[in-house]
Image (cartoon, rainbow, N blue to C red):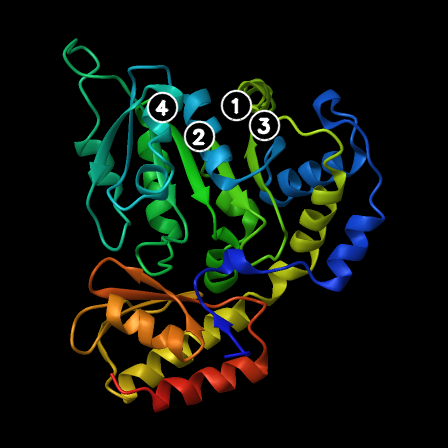
Amino acid sequence: MANIIDLRSDTVTKPSEAMKERMFTAELGDDVFQEDPTVNELQQLAADLFGMEAALFCSSGTQTNQIAIGVHCNPGDELICSNMAHIYVYEGGGIALNSGVSVRLVPGDRGRFTADDVLNNINNKHDIHLPLTRLVCIEDTMNKGGGAIWDIRDISKISNACKQNGLAFHCDGARLFNALIESGVSAKEYGSYFDSISICLSKGLGAPVGSLLLGSKAFIERARRRRKSLGGGMRQAGMLAAAGIYALQVERLRLSEDHQRAKEIEQLLLHLKHAQEVMPVETNIFIWKPKGGKSLPLVEILKANGILCFPFGNEWIRFVFHRDITNEQFQDLKKRLEAITF
C-alpha cells in the first residue's frame, strides 16, 4: 500500500523544509574545542529555557542519560528508578556497562512512584553490605506507561526527599515537552526541581539527531569529559544543532495536535469495541489491548492495511502520533481502523 501510516514511533519524523534550511545555513566550528557557535547557541537556549546553568549537546537520549548516571554515581553505587524506566529497560544494559552502578527498581502507577517510595528504598549508608544510594531517576513522559505525565507536586516532593538525603535527581525527559505543553507547567519551574535533565530533539520535535543534557556548570564540565570518553565528541555539529534550535523555537509549540489525535483514536477504538483495555491517553502515545488478546497477529493485520505499529509485549499495541502524520493520513487511519475485522 502506497500510503503508509507510520505509528511505530515519533522517532520516524523527518526535518521540515524550514528546518533543513536552518541546517544548510548554520555557522560551523569545532565543537570539541567548544568553538561551534550554533552548538553553543543551542546549549544556551536550552539551559535558559529550564533556568539551568549549562547544557551539553549529545547524539542521543541514551547518551545523555548514561552520561548523567556516570557523573552522578561512582562504580558500586545504586540508583532508584521505575521498573519500567527507559534507562533500565531500553539502554542496552548501559547502567552496568558504562558506570558499574546497581539499580533499585520501584513499581508504581504506570511508571510513576512517590517520595515515600524513594525514602523506603534508600539504603542504610552505614551498612557496608549495601551499595550507597546516590541517584533517583524519573522518566517524563513515561513511555511504557502510555505517555503518562508526572504530577509536578510529586516531583517537588521527590526533589525535597533527594535534597534531604543527599541524593541527585535526574529526569529522562525524552518526551518532556509533551508533558509540559499538556500540564501547563513552565520549563523554568520544572528545571528547578532537578540536578540534571535530558531532553530529546529527535522525537516529536522533528530534529534528525540529538539530545541535550542540562545541569550546573560543574556538572556539565564533568559531563563533557564523560561524553568524550564515550566517543560522543562531535566536530562541526552546528548543522545538527541548528535543527535543534528550530525544534525548540517552533516545533515544540505544536505538540498538542499529536495529543488530540491520540485521544481521538482512543475514543474511536473504544466506540468500535476493538480495544479490550486501554492505558488512558495523556499525550501522544496510545497503548491498547486488542479484543481477542494477542498483539502480534493484529500488528501484522494492521501492517497489511498500511498501518505500522509496535507490539508492546504479547498483549498490548503502541501507537505514537507525531508531526509527520498529515491530516489526510489521520482521516484515512480512522477509516482503515473502522474497516478492519478484529
Helix, strand or loop at label 3? It is loop
What residue is shown with label 3?
Answer: 232
Determine crowd level at label 2: few under 14, some 14-19, many 20+ residues with C-alpha closer than 10 A. many
Q: Looking at numbered disc 2 in the image, what kind of residue is underneath it?
A: Gln
Helix, strand or loop at label 4? It is helix
Helix, strand or loop at label 1? It is loop
Determine crowd level at label 1: few under 14, some 14-19, many 20+ residues with C-alpha closer than 10 A. few
Numbered circles on residues, count: 4
Cα–Cα span, label 4 and label 3: 16 Å
What residue is shown with label 1?
Answer: 230
Q: Quadrant of the C terminus?
A: bottom left
Query: Left or right of 157: which side holds 320?
Result: right
Q: Looking at numbered disc 3 in the image, what kind of residue is underneath it?
A: Gly
The label shown at residue 142 is: none
Rendering quarter of residue 162: top left
The answer to whether the residues at label 1 and label 2 have Cβ atoms under 8 Å apart is yes
| Image spot of residue 121 (x, y percent) | 19, 31
Q: Looking at numbered disc 4 in the image, what kind of residue is underneath it?
A: Leu
Residue ID at (49%, 86%)? 332
The answer to whether the residues at label 1 and label 3 have Cβ atoms under 8 Å apart is yes
The mark that comes first in sequence, 2 or 4, is 2
The label shown at residue 97 is: 4
